[in-house]
Image: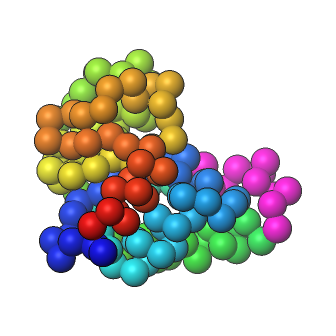
Amino acid sequence: MLCAVIQNVVIDTNVLVSALIQRSYPYRIVYEQFLGNAFQLCVSEKLLAEYYQVLARPKFSRFPDFFLRAESLLAQVESRAVRYTPSLELRIITDADDNMILELADECAADFIVTGNINDFTFSEYKQTKILTPKEFWEMLNQR
């Protein structure tokens, strides 16, 4: 069962892409947990811009109804997520987009970052934020 405390979560763009392509852990996290209000999604303007940019890439046209589903999901993110403006600029990870995720996590005091990017996120915590793969996050949510 889920804990009654709503937790702040930052979802990396790769998790949204995966949720739109296949029905695995990212799908369950986004469509069952986020849309079911099991946690509070935290975003920044930079992260939202990345969501829009990545989800509009032509390479995803090979997946049936990808753009239609992406548009619907982004509308849900826009209406349900809480926006933050990070004041800290970090240079911990070589990829600037990944630093953007850490900056947001710092600003919103995120409980979790959910990412499939284990190449750049080689550490399991940043300050108070645990960094989990979609599978780890799903399993943690369902142990409660």
Residue 50 seen by the camera: no
* 122 relative position to 17: left or right: left
Q: Which residues are magenta?
A: 54-64
Dominant SS in magenta: helix
Task: Report the side of 115 relative to 128 (left or right).
Answer: right
* Quarter-of-image position of residue 86: top left
Q: Nearer the viewer, residue 120 or 33?
A: 33
Give the image location of residue 133, x and y in percent. 45, 44
Residue that appears at 46% across and 64% down: 29
Vertical position of residue 79 compared to residue 127: above or below: below
On screen, residue 11 above or below 143? above
Task: Classify the position of the C terminus by image quarter.
Answer: bottom left
Q: Percent x, y for residue 109?
A: 15, 50
| Residue 127 in picture, x, y percent from top left | 15, 35
Foreground of the two, 107 or 28 = 28
Question: Which quarter shows the N terminus?
Answer: bottom left
